[in-house]
Image (tube, coloured by chain):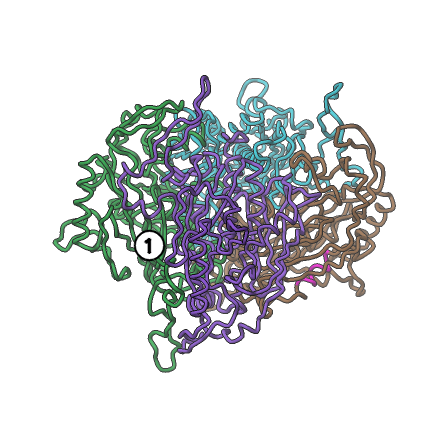
Chain colours: A brown, B cyan, C green, D purple
Amino acid sequence: MPGNTFGQLFRVTTAGESHGAANVVIVDGCPAGVALEIEDLRAELVRRRPGQSHLVTQRREADEPEIVAGVFEGRTTGSSIAVLVRNTDARSRDYVDIKDKYRPGHADFTYDAKFGFRDYRGGGRASARETVARVIAGAIAKKLIHDAFGGTIVGYVVQVGDVHASVTEPAAVVIEQVETLPDGSPNIVRCPHPEAARAMVELIERVRKELDSVGGVAEVVATGVPAGLGEPVFDKLKADLGKALFSIPAVLGVEYGVGFAGAALRGSQNNDLFVPVGEQQGVRPRIATTTNRHGGMLGGISSGMPIVLRAAVKPTSSLPREQSTVTSEGEPTTMRTTGRHDPCLLPRFVPIAEAMVAIVLADHWLRWCAQSQGHPRL
Amino acid sequence: MPGNTFGQLFRVTTAGESHGAANVVIVDGCPAGVALEIEDLRAELVRRRPGQSHLVTQRREADEPEIVAGVFEGRTTGSSIAVLVRNTDARSRDYVDIKDKYRPGHADFTYDAKFGFRDYRGGGRASARETVARVIAGAIAKKLIHDAFGGTIVGYVVQVGDVHASVTEPAAVVIEQVETLPDGSPNIVRCPHPEAARAMVELIERVRKELDSVGGVAEVVATGVPAGLGEPVFDKLKADLGKALFSIPAVLGVEYGVGFAGAALRGSQNNDLFVPVGEQQGVRPRIATTTNRHGGMLGGISSGMPIVLRAAVKPTSSLPREQSTVTSEGEPTTMRTTGRHDPCLLPRFVPIAEAMVAIVLADHWLRWCAQSQGHPRL
Amino acid sequence: MPGNTFGQLFRVTTAGESHGAANVVIVDGCPAGVALEIEDLRAELVRRRPGQSHLVTQRREADEPEIVAGVFEGRTTGSSIAVLVRNTDARSRDYVDIKDKYRPGHADFTYDAKFGFRDYRGGGRASARETVARVIAGAIAKKLIHDAFGGTIVGYVVQVGDVHASVTEPAAVVIEQVETLPDGSPNIVRCPHPEAARAMVELIERVRKELDSVGGVAEVVATGVPAGLGEPVFDKLKADLGKALFSIPAVLGVEYGVGFAGAALRGSQNNDLFVPVGEQQGVRPRIATTTNRHGGMLGGISSGMPIVLRAAVKPTSSLPREQSTVTSEGEPTTMRTTGRHDPCLLPRFVPIAEAMVAIVLADHWLRWCAQSQGHPRL
Amino acid sequence: MPGNTFGQLFRVTTAGESHGAANVVIVDGCPAGVALEIEDLRAELVRRRPGQSHLVTQRREADEPEIVAGVFEGRTTGSSIAVLVRNTDARSRDYVDIKDKYRPGHADFTYDAKFGFRDYRGGGRASARETVARVIAGAIAKKLIHDAFGGTIVGYVVQVGDVHASVTEPAAVVIEQVETLPDGSPNIVRCPHPEAARAMVELIERVRKELDSVGGVAEVVATGVPAGLGEPVFDKLKADLGKALFSIPAVLGVEYGVGFAGAALRGSQNNDLFVPVGEQQGVRPRIATTTNRHGGMLGGISSGMPIVLRAAVKPTSSLPREQSTVTSEGEPTTMRTTGRHDPCLLPRFVPIAEAMVAIVLADHWLRWCAQSQGHPRL
């Protein structure tokens, strides 16, 4: 099976290159009757859009979506939904110079090794431009899981370079904090901790001036997810979420709950203990855990506690400075990337990561509906 | 699609509970003509086997595989291969006490939430017993990728609790180091750094005496992998490897190459530079990178450099001490796990992680054979 | 994706050769809580078993199933179910003669062309022996669809050679008629029309004496299927049923409803007209059609009317008489099949065809449960 | 898995309604480097186009394809290919009358039963308009199989109502005969037998005048297909071809080779005998069969002989005459279809059937490339 499809029952198929005519996404399996307006898509695309602040690439794309199939009178029909986004600011001339050179850190070399040639304009299919399709599919998935079980997904930046934000209560972060600073100005770095946000902005401005880039870490939290999502043994929820995040360009690592820090712990420190919640005479209580080191998943199945994931994102590989490399013939050369790039990927990474998490949850929700023959235990 | 199948073209389907009659694996898609003896399977199973040292669970399983289909006269036929491993030391009585209690850190609660009831004996399908099937499939995958392109996979432990091993040259570690100490004795903790190995053993012995458990980190390295494996955009090699490792019980995080440490780097520090290798008059040189912070994958496609992954494994949730929890009715109670458990999962985790990496590489190898119509660029 | 798996959500994976150790089936995706006893499997296997009458192959197989995973205390657990059937009467010596010869009408030549070599014993994987696994999976599927919506599947023979049975009311045929004649004796040819059944038996006895074989047609009817099963546009119910039946060895053609005869009709003759059924004051009536030329599917989706399918089955290719052929080196030769074979495949084809139809309906039932988010419109 | 995707490795995903904005197809898995021009797509679309003759629907669609992704400098890139066809002559007002009525023979009722509501304009997703996407994907598949192994696919009409054409040598029919009559005029009914073609045209004209429609049978022949395509046991080539044809709207039956007629034959009449072909001193001969009753597939795997399939197509359900039916509330009513319809589907069915056969062969070709690890035995 080729690799441009994601998901089993909520199934996303995409096509599109950085400098081609358009990006296309077909979402198949979305149940009938979900209210869907073009505005739902725009609201998410604007968070991913290039040129949204001085911290990100200055490519100017309207990113205007067109729903061409699968929606009738404002509701999904149960058929496949197709959405189109035309590329409008694709300056291919920026890339002629790199036609025969392999940019360090990019997929130029590996695509040539795989396919024998490549669409070199802006990275072609390997460009993060393809994530526009993910965000559209994610917007549909967010609608579905919100309607189905009140699921909400919020992502934010917790690290840029050596600047760390301390977010002690992930499930309490709301999207308003991520998008807007306390003073009402746009939170262009999408870190919910205002001081850290300011330090991150400064760091990104500095690395840009230094003709460099910087990495970071984003955290994504899903709340309202019922216990029971995820499939033994290979399609554990953590496994599909892990794949979803790793499939995004530039992701170097993924963890959930206590993550890598858990390697240093004892079992007696790490286990979250079950307790009854909402005890009432004559009513069976809900079961929860007092702590959430398990990040909302036990045995790879959602526990009803908030799902908490983190992804490490590498510093942008494209640098506006000279780097040594080789030509496609293997001859040493040098190059300088002259396209328009983000000095730090994190601010625009947030909506993409949210989208992928939403798609996985929508998919596993439908899988659970099947498995339970219409009686998921909400 | 239900979750007991992994892979697209090298396709592994498993069944089996901790205390059921047997574990079964069907490997579909293995090309015809691969030499396969029962000994190939035994050699890997013995590395995963319970009771192999005093550091691991003392459950006594022969783990004797029987090939019941798909192999004829010592070679795979191209049909589906089925292998069976009977469970022989399943003491169900150990588990009657926990029938109605939710063990902290385990899937008891989430399975009940999902399925409405569960096979409570030893965790049923959620038990790590199912990994016996993964190791068998991995043994077949290892044969295939070795025959096809000389691919070799070596895993080892780099951290247990606060004991870290320094492995500066991952691709140079050989399986002999992992399995045997310099003095010829078995390397029961599977850390290739002898001093760290000793400290890890001591730590595990200590936590066991303390009726506790401890987590750790394993590293898996694949060498000999040609450039070109992995599929844009969702089935990136890193994405499928990420899923493969996250699908293993107890894995909390996965990273490759520089991993989470990359979040703190600048692009100028992180980019690996391309260089020609093996230059010779009149011959086009091979292309490599001087460093391998990218862990052998660029744009999610293998680069020809060693693939380096790490997985964080949680401390065993089963503890032979009293812990508070709830019953399935939500009433507070306490429990003590009386089954036989590993105080640290890492030594036995290594062959399982290797198996999953092998399966992904075998799968992507076949996908590349399809994509290139029989002309993969080795 | 390799070809030994069938279905999306009710997912059947099989392995096993005619003369290997065992046949294995893993059914993944069966919901938790379905009552399943070994007797449910035996009851179907006995209908497919060789040696059940003098009309069929005299190979003696106990066909004793063993459930090795996925069932706990008499109910499915929601995990993958594995069932094993050992081969006990595999006389490989019968086949040494054909090791290097291509039997006419068999897959010997095509398997060699595909895989480079083959398990020549009894046809290996190409033997109809593999259908034992289908019948087991079908028995589980039958339980599921009966529990879920009262679905019932009955198959029977309507043609053997030039003997045709007239079955004017397919949905009225019950399994008792198919298995037993009015006089209480076994209906060994599985034709519900007693006179035709007698003529078919006579014909089969005659062709066997003539060292020949004969083809036929079976009809399969599914009743109680709610309107709404089937997925636009490629996974129409008729498309998946068509594939299911074509996947059975020896099937040459498949049709539903009016079938090929519809090619000669006018639209005004062929359209089934909708009418209200069960009209009652204040209650919305059920909608049905007065006739069922559409065979229970419109637009590839079930209409609530009985689903009626027919499959043409070729005369057994193995003949106990001399036929000319070639060796694997392409040299002309002759051969005579000395194994044990059915002079007519139809009697044993019936339970196999029923099983495949049941699997498709179980699969689409679960797909509908997903699509409707737990509110299929029964 | 939802139903708008077809194929495993050559993977076609479509979206689009009869009266929506556009139809979209994404072809994923097409190898890199296949020459592909817009003209290749147009050439096939023109054969399927409405309004091409007085025998077919007079809806006027330009059917102008736009390749928006996956092709660079005239060659496929190995990434997903996306093609868009805008709907330009969608007269929705024709359908307002049927919003609340169920057209006999159509999917109106079953879509409502499944999805709870429907895009009633022109049948929405159930309209044959979606086949425009199939024809595009088929055009790409035809290029691939022709480049890969010289595979050629020709379809034609062999029956309309009671008019039968006698085509004794299916593999000898060339597309020119199908498209053009001996006198150079267009063969608007696509029957290669000129006299039968004339009679078919007359019949179709007559049924149209009678405000009726008529069914028929098409035959599709694939030549040049190497022995070895098809996967045991469920994904037999005949099974996937069967599904492909059954997935097309209005198909009632599918058969290959001798088909249903084989049910009446003896094994001694039906078996095709193997013979060496092209014998030459010192060279191993090719193996063929003297006859081709097996329709090019044995054991579900291609034999190297021409693949011959037939599909029965029902008479168009839309009739411009009054028919009785019910409303969505179940009340009896009458209706007359006022949209523009084909009095006989067969002439336009031919390119659609060819497309589906091409897609299956492309898919199985790539699967064989994988299975054989790059050494398919051509």
Q: Amino acid at mark 1?
A: Lys
Where is residue B74? Give x, y as percent. 41, 24
Along the line of sight, the residue nearer the viewer: A232 or C355: C355
Under circle 1, the secondary element is: helix
Q: Residue furthest bottom?
A: C281
Task: Answer with left or right where residue C312 lies relative to residue D15.
Answer: left
Point 41% across, 49% down: residue: D310
Along the line of sight, the residue nearer the viewer: D241 or C371: D241
Q: Residue furthest front?
A: D183
Q: Residue furthest right?
A: A209
Rendered-image quadrant of the C terminus of chain B: top right
Along the line of sight, the residue nearer the viewer: B352 or B291: B291
Label 1: how many Cα within 10 Å (few below 14, some 14–19, many 20+): some
Where is residue A123? Give x, y as percent. 73, 43
Task: Answer with left or right where residue C47 lies relative to residue C227.
Answer: left
Where is residue D346? Give x, y as percent. 46, 56
Task: Answer with left or right where residue C328 lies relative to residue C90.
Answer: right
- Residue at numbered disc 1: C143
Along the line of sight, the residue nearer the viewer: A168 or D221: D221
Give the magenta part as a residue range. Answer: A41-48
Residue A111 to residue D326: above or below? above
Q: Chain of mark 1?
A: C
Q: Is residue D117 magenta?
A: no
Task: Answer with left or right where residue C18 lies relative to residue D40.
Answer: left
In the figure, residue C102 lies in which quadrant? Answer: top left
Does the magenta stretch mainly form a helix, a strand or a loop? helix
Q: Is residue A47 magenta?
A: yes
Residue A258 appears anywhere in the view: no
Where is residue D158? Give x, y as percent. 42, 51
Residue A198 appears anywhere in the view: yes
